Every structure is written in structure tokens, then in C-alpha cells.
Image (cartoon, rainbow, N blue to C red):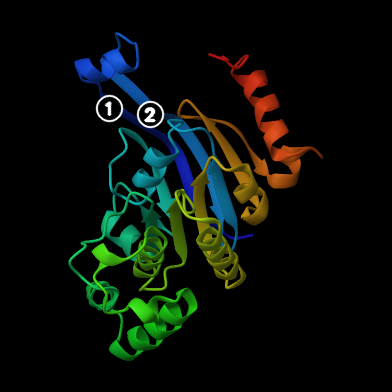
């Protein structure tokens, strides 16, 4: 398999305000969000980052997408460094997060055309791709409706297609089904599998065990900013459910889970 992503010792810290210190019940003035995290991903596979909220998954993906800089470490994505060549990295990836907020005044049509132009997609290619995506996700019926008037599920679909206007080889999704109804979540999940079938590399973060089991080839378990296990899905599971193995690994590597 051809390696397309190598993550090497990423570390990211954030300063904590007095209010944040109180909320987190700590006297530490700095929070280590990601700590010496490394993994690889291969062309044409789905790699999942699995962990609870606050584990460092989103911070990791934001570093890979060059939205924030690591304090230490680097990642080489299809030959480009996230530290040394962030603009080249951005040209190679699509990035989608549930926190992406589209400007509510604009329509799906306008946003798709705007981002296609931004990425330099040829007009005819952009037109054909938009027709395909809009019909597939049912956006065509709402193409001229302002984003602010769309349902949550439709906004997520628009965000998805906008992130893929340039047909990137590496697609980074942070909690792709978070907050979606079951029907929309299935549409998004099926689309991820179609992208995989086309040879795309997908890096996805989630805390949902069933999503990992359905779409991922390999999985990295992230706890407290560290990778505590990383392997192909079947090796991680060892014949058990992913949920059962997650808690076994957690207790083995981290300790007993605090019920409080």
C-alpha cells in the first residue's frame, strides 16, 4: 500500500484562562491537547481517530488541515509538509467539520461556484461536478434558497459538497455525522464509502463506534491527546465488538474508568 500521510510527533498546547482552569478543576495554566501523536495513512483507505470528546481528535485534524500550527512535530501529506508547505497541503485536501458555519445570506449555488473559482476548477468541470453532487444530495431543489433557511441536515450536505469542489485525494472529516438525523447520517456515510471506492483517502474522527466499524480500515484510539492503540480494525477488535475492546484498551493503558 502506498503511504499518503505520515504524522510525526504532533504536539499542541493551549493557554488556559482563569475561568477555564476553574471549569477543568486544575491549576495548570497550559493544557496539552495533543502530545507526541504519530500515525500513518495509506492511499485509498479510511483511517479513523476514535476517542471521547476532548481527547484531541479535532485539534489533530485542524493541524493536518493547516488551520492551526503544531508546537512540535510535523505531518507529510502526499509529499507536502503541514509546517513547511501549508498552501500546498490545502490544495490536496478537503476538510469538513460539524462546526463549519456557512454564511447564511448566500445560496448553495453561489457558495459552490465561489469555492470552485477559489480552487481554480475549470468551469465545465465545476458545472458537471455540481450537478452530480446537487442531485445526489437533493440540494438541487434548494440551490437558490439562502443557507439560513435550510435544515440542519441540508446545511451539512452543502458543507460537504463545498469541501469537495476540487475533488481532493485526501479528505479530512471531523465528526461527519454529528448532530445529523439518521437518514442524513446514512447518506453521508454511504458517500464516504463511495469516495473510498474511488481511491480517496479519508481521515475521520468520531466517538461513534458503529461509524468506525462500518467505514474504517484502520483505527487509532486517542485518549488525553495520545495515541494509545493503532492498527487495522480487525486486529484492534480481536473478535470482540469495538466498544468492548475500546474500554479494555482504555483500562489497560490508562487505568480504571472514573464512573463519576
- Compared to 211, does 142 lie above or below? below
For disc 1, the marked residue is 14
The secondary element bearing badge 2 is classed as: strand
Q: Can you name the residue that lies furthest to the top here?
A: 27
Residue 144 or 209: which is nearer the viewer?
Answer: 144
Does the CB distance between marks 1 and 2 fall below 8 Å? yes
Q: Can you name the residue that lies furthest to the right here?
A: 239
Residue drawn at point x = 24 percent, y = 73 percent: 107
Residue drawn at point x = 45 percent, y = 54 percent: 173
Q: CA distance from mark 1 to mark 2?
A: 7 Å
Q: x%, y% of residue 186?
A: 57, 61
Q: x%, y% of residue 54?
A: 42, 30
Residue 174 or 121: which is nearer the viewer?
Answer: 174
Residue drawn at point x = 75 percent, y = 39 percent: 241
Q: x%, y% of residue 70?
A: 32, 37
| Mark seen at residue 70 | none
- Quarter holding the N terminus? bottom right
Q: Can you name the residue that lies furthest to the left here?
A: 105
Residue 217 or 141: which is nearer the viewer?
Answer: 141
- Disc 1 or 2, which lies upstream in sequence? 1
Residue drawn at point x = 65 percent, y = 19 percent: 251
Quarter-of-image position of residue 209 = top right
Q: Is residue 147 left or right of residue 203?
A: left
Q: x%, y% of residue 101?
A: 27, 55
How crowded is the residue under tag 2: few (<14 C-alpha within 10 Å), some, or many (20+)? many
Quarter-of-image position of residue 86 = bottom left
The secondary element bearing badge 1 is classed as: strand
How crowded is the residue under tag 1: few (<14 C-alpha within 10 Å), some, or many (20+)? few
Quarter-of-image position of residue 108 = bottom left
For disc 2, the marked residue is 33
Amino acid at each position: 500500500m502506498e503511504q499518503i500521510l505520515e504524522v510525526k510527533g504532533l504536539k499542541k498546547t493551549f493557554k488556559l484562562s482563569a475561568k477555564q482552569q476553574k471549569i477543568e478543576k486544575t491549576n495548570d495554566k497550559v493544557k496539552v491537547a495533543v502530545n507526541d501523536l504519530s500515525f500513518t495513512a495509506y492511499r485509498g483507505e479510511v483511517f479513523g481517530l476514535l476517542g471521547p470528546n476532548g481527547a484531541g481528535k479535532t485539534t489533530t485534524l485542524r493541524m493536518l488541515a493547516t488551520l492551526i500550527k503544531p508546537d512540535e512535530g510535523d505531518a507529510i501529506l502526499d509529499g507536502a509538509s503541514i509546517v513547511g508547505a501549508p498552501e500546498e497541503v490545502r490544495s490536496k485536501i478537503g476538510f469538513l467539520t460539524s462546526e463549519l458555519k456557512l454564511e447564511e445570506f448566500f445560496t448553495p449555488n453561489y457558495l459552490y461556484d465561489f469555492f470552485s473559482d477559489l480552487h481554480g476548477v475549470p468551469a465545465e468541470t465545476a458545472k458537471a461536478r455540481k450537478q452530480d453532487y446537487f442531485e445526489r444530495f437533493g440540494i438541487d431543489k434548494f440551490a437558490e434558497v439562502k443557507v439560513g433557511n435550510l435544515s440542519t441536515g441540508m446545511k451539512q450536505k452543502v458543507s460537504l459538497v463545498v469541501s469537495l469542489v476540487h475533488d481532493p485525494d485526501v479528505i479530512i472529516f471531523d465528526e461527519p455525522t454529528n448532530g445529523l438525523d439518521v437518514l442524513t447520517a446514512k447518506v453521508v456515510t454511504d458517500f464516504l464509502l463511495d469516495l473510498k471506492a474511488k481511491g480517496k483517502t479519508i481521515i475521520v474522527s468520531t466517538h461513534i463506534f458503529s461509524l468506525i466499524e462500518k467505514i474504517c480500515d484502520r483505527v487509532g484510539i486517542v485518549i488525553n491527546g495520545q495515541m494509545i492503540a493503532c492498527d487495522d480494525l480487525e486486529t484492534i477488535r480481536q473478535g470482540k465488538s469495538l466498544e468492548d475492546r475500546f474500554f479494555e484498551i482504555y483500562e489497560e493503558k490508562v487505568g480504571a474508568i472514573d464512573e463519576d
